[in-house]
Amino acid sequence: MQVARTRPELASARSGLSGAVGLVPTMGALHAGHEALIGEAVRRCSAVVVSIFVNPLQFGPDEDLDRYPRTLDDDLARCESAAVDVVWVPEVEDVYPDGPARVRIDPGPLGRELEGASRPGHFSGSLTVVAKLLNQVGPHTAVFGEKDYQQLVLVRRMVRDLDLPVDVASVSTVREPGGLALSSRNRYLTEDERERASSLWRALSAGRAAAGTGQAAVLTAAQAALAGVEVEYLELRAPDLGAAPPSGPARLLVAARIGVTRLIDNVAVDL
């Protein structure tokens, strides 16, 4: 496994890769969910690059950029065990050599809804860095998790709208035994907060179980199961995050704060 920390090192490492190359973009603090993404990239591609970069452009002024977990030694060990070929670990100056990007990706109307309403500018920052990573690595496939479902939808839209030559693959959310979606931010939770956070999965499960009786029943059942958390949104949408259909595939999404920690989750439902 090669570790590249500068653009010349990345270019040199990338030139040694043959066949289809897969990219798994991460912000580090890797866990079993990231390992599932890497496994999918390994399955699909001849070589795999994992990027580890805490992107300041997608954090708001009151968010957790400074305390976001950074566990590089453990991350590199996980990548080594997962048969990753190259780990791209740039500094901020390598990604934004002229300072914060003045030209950024506009995520469109969806970027100002759901997560975008709670975190203004977040998706402009995340799509901009994803576009930069795709250009820097030049992968054939990029793999994202369904836990960050709105990001996945927007990345796919960006790739289509801008004719970027990459296939976007996704992996289902990996969960703890009690259903809590794996997240790097879970390490912030106390034991009491972790128990309260498990109500997100109970709510999504209750909503999914009620899907056969219509939209209102889904939201009513999910809302009734939420307890001990500060809900920011609970919404039922189409799979592309447009308006929910009267019947057929849909997506139930939730965001909530538990103490100082903000968590998101979602599940597919069939109305």
Image (spheres, helix red, strand yellow):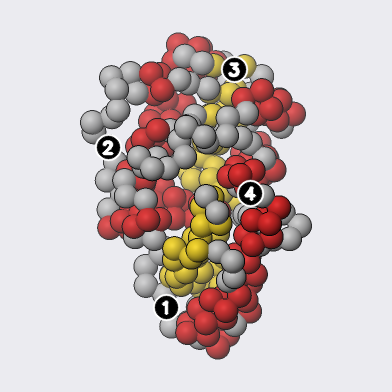
The reply to whether residue 127 is in sight is no
Eye-nearest disc, 2 or 4 = 4
Task: Give whichever of discs 1 and 4 has the lower sequence position.
Answer: 4
Q: Which residue is rendered at x = 47% and y = 69% of the image?
A: 234
Task: Give whichever of discs 3 and 4 has the lower sequence position.
Answer: 3
Q: Which residue is rendered at x = 56% and y = 57% of the image?
A: 258
Alpha-carbon distance for marks 2 and 4? 33 Å
The mark found on residue 189 in the picture is 4
The residue tagged 2 is 104
Disc 3 secondary structure class: strand
Disc 2 secondary structure class: loop
User: What is the total number of numbered labels drawn onto the structure image?
Assistant: 4
Alpha-carbon distance for marks 3 and 2? 28 Å
**Left or right, residue 73 beside residue 67:** right
The residue tagged 3 is 3
From this view, report whether residue 130 is shown above or below residue 14: below
The reply to whether residue 34 is in sight is yes
Kind of residue at disc 4: Leu
Quadrant location, the N terminus: top right
